[in-house]
């Protein structure tokens, strides 16, 4: 009788979750969990709790539930459950910006799942996002290329949406904004198409990716100077996220609105948006996004011209967080902002030192083009990756690009043949 009641509570939680009442669903499952005797029911309920916690931005709770899943999977000696649990564990660590752990757990998820299984593709996506956090872009591209192949084999269009979106994120980080926009448009179009034909069971997941891709599209449009288009996209994403309590997307929408307002010199409004976003993101323990918001706030305060001390203090926090994450690119951008502050205060020697630190960080992150020895991602530019996943300024490797579709060329960095690859071209050329 007791176990029947427990199963009913789990089912009621699923109904509440379907109605977007995430907190009530979490409460229902949390109440039922201690009474469960069936280990597999405990495992699946912890999976529901992990998913709902992620939707509400409770990233530490997500991690706790994933760890509990691992214990059950090992107890049952079930490799299918191990793969699912390790995937959740890797996702939780990536969201908490613990990137080395995320990559390690992604490998475990792949180890316990069959070759070509969708879990392998999603684990590769987590690794790709983690390697972006660690600024290892060749590894990012390797993971994305493999994930793209799996998405096609499994006919998993949501996985392909994420591959395209993460590829756009690579080009955003490297400041090749036209390529970022092209990939993000493709991601959004595919998300819309998938949502239009999604089954009732997958409708929620499909609509989630429509929100996410619209938000990311707004970022790319803003960087290309299309402020009306960016504003419409972010307002649509915010409206959809607010209607169901999707706090992570709401917070990131606030950052995007702040960016748009700053780009249009509406700095007072931008400040308020960034401050609200930083509070939400820090509550969620989203260090990566909160650091981006802090950098946006610093730029806004500098534009106002009367808050240099406050900007310096926030920048110090952003730098500290960037160091704790191991993100060299974000650290470099902190030093470049510090250079601006120091120049405004006529501390030219210190400013030069800050620039030199930033340049060294680009070098440490392997972001100096092998041809011209200049940084990639310091200024807007066109970037191209070869099939070996090494990246260069596009103008520096034009000869290779013009010939590689019909004649083997060689990477200037590793010496490998970079003959045309259909799989890779589908991923990395726009």
Image (cartoon, rainbow, N blue to C red):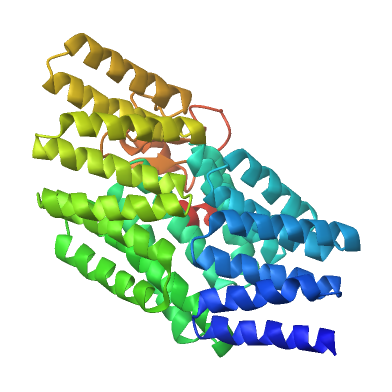
Q: Quadrant of the N terminus?
A: bottom right
Q: Quadrant of the C terminus?
A: bottom left
Q: Nearer the viewer, residue 71 or 391?
A: 71
Residue occupying image coordinates x 56% and y 65%: 53
Work out whether 160 lies above or below 395: below
The spot of residue 4 in percent (x, y) is 81, 89
Left or right, 46 with reference to 409: right
Q: Which of 129 and 354 is in front in this view?
A: 354
Work out whether 339 lies above or below 396: above
Left or right, 57 with reference to 335: right
Total marks placed:
0
Residue 21 in view (yes/no): yes
Q: Nearer the viewer, residue 335 or 174?
A: 335
Residue 387 in view (yes/no): no
Left or right, 29 with reference to 254: right
Q: Which residue lies furthest to the top in this view?
A: 349
Instruction: Name the image quarter holding residue 118.
Output: bottom right
Work out whether 62 lies above or below 244: above
The spot of residue 76 in percent (x, y) is 90, 63
The spot of residue 18 in percent (x, y) is 54, 84
Residue occupying image coordinates x 24% and y 43%: 297
Residue occupying image coordinates x 45% and y 70%: 209
The spot of residue 189 in percent (x, y) is 38, 72
Instruction: Name the image quarter holding residue 31.
Output: bottom right
Left or right, 122 with reference to 318: right
């Amino acid at each position: 009788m007791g176990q029947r009641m427990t199963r009913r509570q789990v089912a009621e939680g699923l109904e509440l979750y379907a109605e977007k009442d995430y907190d009530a669903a979490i409460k229902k499952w949390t109440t039922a969990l201690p009474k469960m005797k069936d280990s597999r029911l405990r495992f699946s309920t912890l999976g529901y709790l992990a998913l709902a916690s992620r939707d509400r931005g409770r990233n530490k709770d997500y991690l706790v539930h994933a760890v509990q899943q691992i214990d059950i999977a090992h107890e049952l000696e079930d490799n299918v459950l191990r793969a699912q649990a390790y995937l959740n564990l890797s996702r939780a660590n990536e969201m908490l910006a613990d990137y080395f752990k995320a990559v390690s757990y992604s490998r475990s998820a792949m180890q316990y799942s069959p070759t070509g299984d969708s879990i392998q593709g999603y684990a590769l996506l987590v690794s790709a996002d983690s390697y972006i956090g660690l600024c290892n872009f060749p590894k990012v591209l390797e993971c994305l290329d493999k994930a793209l192949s799996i998405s096609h084999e499994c006919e998993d269009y949501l996985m392909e949406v994420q591959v395209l979106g993460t590829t756009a994120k690579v080009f955003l980080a490297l400041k090749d904004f036209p390529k970022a926009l092209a990939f993000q448009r493709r991601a959004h179009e595919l998300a819309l198409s998938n949502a239009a034909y999604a089954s009732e069971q997958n409708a929620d997941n499909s609509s989630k990716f429509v929100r996410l891709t619209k938000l990311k599209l707004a970022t790319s449009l803003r960087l290309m100077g299309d402020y009306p288009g960016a504003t419409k996209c972010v307002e649509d994403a915010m409206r959809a996220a607010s209607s169901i309590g999707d706090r992570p997307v709401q917070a990131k929408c606030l950052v995007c609105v702040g960016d748009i307002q700053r780009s249009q010199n509406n700095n007072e409004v931008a400040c308020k948006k960034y401050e609200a976003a930083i509070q939400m993101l820090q509550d969620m323990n989203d260090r990566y996004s909160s650091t981006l918001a802090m950098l946006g706030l610093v730029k806004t305060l500098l534009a106002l011209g009367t808050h240099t001390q406050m900007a310096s203090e926030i920048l110090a926090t952003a730098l500290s967080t960037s160091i704790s994450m191991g993100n060299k690119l974000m650290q470099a951008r902190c030093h470049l902002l510090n250079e601006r502050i120091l120049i405004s205060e006529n501390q030219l020697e210190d400013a030069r030192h800050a620039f030199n630190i930033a340049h060294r960080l680009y070098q440490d992150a392997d972001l100096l083009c092998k041809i011209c020895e200049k940084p990639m991602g310091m200024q807007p530019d066109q970037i191209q990756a070869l099939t070996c996943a090494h990246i260069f300024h596009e103008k520096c490797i034009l000869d290779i690009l013009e010939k590689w579709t019909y004649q083997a060329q060689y990477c200037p960095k590793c010496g490998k043949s970079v003959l045309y690859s259909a799989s890779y071209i589908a991923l990395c050329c726009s």
